[in-house]
Image: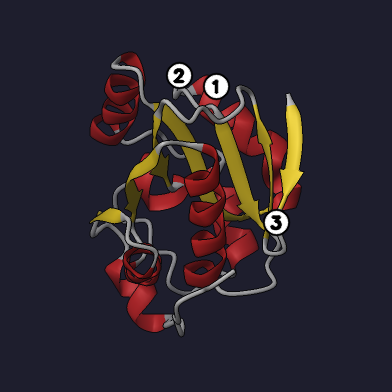
């Protein structure tokens, strides 16, 4: 396991990037996770939400997609706005839910996630043949991926939260 960092994120890799591989990027919360029925996070702080998310189950369809892509030879990167201090609990959640990953990147909280994830995606672009797709619930992270020329799938699981918490997104250049 090797640690690495950018200006806006910190991470670890279980396996180094491979220029012969495609990497698929998955968000954790409201993408790989599934909130319990009637759970409303619009009034929670991010820390309160992340505390509650420790016990959320995996979304069966999204987790199965990650497993399928991995079994077909793609690398899996976890790109999350969770704070870097939550690295170990995030790894434990992924392992408990049998979700494979080669890289995990967590935000330093310096910029909104739509900007931090662009830096994460740039890092992946440097390490792999290509970034296949970003799977995420945030419209701002989807917009950021598009600024980087990366396909994205918007999982519309958390629209009320994002409507109440807008982010400014601009194209991050290095």
Q: Secondary structure at mark 3?
A: loop
Q: Position of residue 89 (x, y in %)?
A: 66, 36
- Left or right: 111, with 101 as reference point: right
Which label sits on residue 6?
3
Q: Are marks 1 and 2 in contact (CB under 8 Å)?
A: yes
Quarter of the image with the C terminus in it: bottom right
**Mark 3 residue crowding within 10 angstroms, few (<14) / some (14–19) / many (20+):** some
Residue sitting at x 51%, y 45%: 124
**Mark 2 highlights which residue?**
98
Q: CA distance from mark 1 to mark 3?
A: 25 Å
**Mark 2 residue crowding within 10 angstroms, few (<14) / some (14–19) / many (20+):** some
Q: Nearer the viewer, residue 31 or 79?
A: 79
**Coloring applied to the structure:** secondary structure
Q: Position of residue 74 (x, y in %)?
A: 36, 25
Q: CA distance from mark 2 to mark 3?
A: 27 Å
Q: Nearer the viewer, mark 2 or mark 3?
A: 3
Which label sits on residue 72?
none
Q: Are marks 1 and 3 in contact (CB under 8 Å)?
A: no
**Mark 1 highlights which residue?**
95
Q: Is residue 158 visible?
A: yes
Residue sitting at x 62%, y 74%: 111
Q: Is residue 34 visible?
A: no
- The mark that comes first in sequence, 1 or 3, is 3
**Mark 1 residue crowding within 10 angstroms, few (<14) / some (14–19) / many (20+):** few
Q: Are marks 2 and 3 in contact (CB under 8 Å)?
A: no
């Amino acid at each position: 396991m090797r640690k690495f960092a950018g200006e806006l994120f910190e991470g670890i890799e279980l396996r180094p990037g491979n220029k012969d591989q495609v990497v698929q990027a998955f968000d954790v919360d409201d993408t790989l996770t599934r909130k319990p029925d009637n759970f409303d996070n619009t009034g929670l702080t991010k820390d309160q939400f992340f505390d509650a998310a420790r016990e959320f189950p995996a979304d069966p369809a999204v987790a199965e997609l990650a497993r399928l892509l991995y079994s077909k030879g793609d690398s899996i990167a976890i790109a999350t706005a969770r704070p870097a201090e939550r690295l170990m609990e995030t790894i434990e959640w992924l392992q408990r839910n049998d979700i494979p990953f080669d890289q995990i990147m967590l935000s330093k909280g310096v910029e909104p996630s739509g900007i931090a994830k662009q830096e994460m995606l740039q890092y992946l672009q440097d390490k792999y043949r290509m970034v296949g797709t970003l799977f995420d619930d945030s419209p701002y992270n989807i917009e950021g991926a598009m600024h980087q020329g990366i396909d994205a799938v918007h999982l519309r699981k958390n629209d009320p939260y994002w409507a109440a918490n807008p982010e400014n997104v601009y194209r991050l250049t290095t």
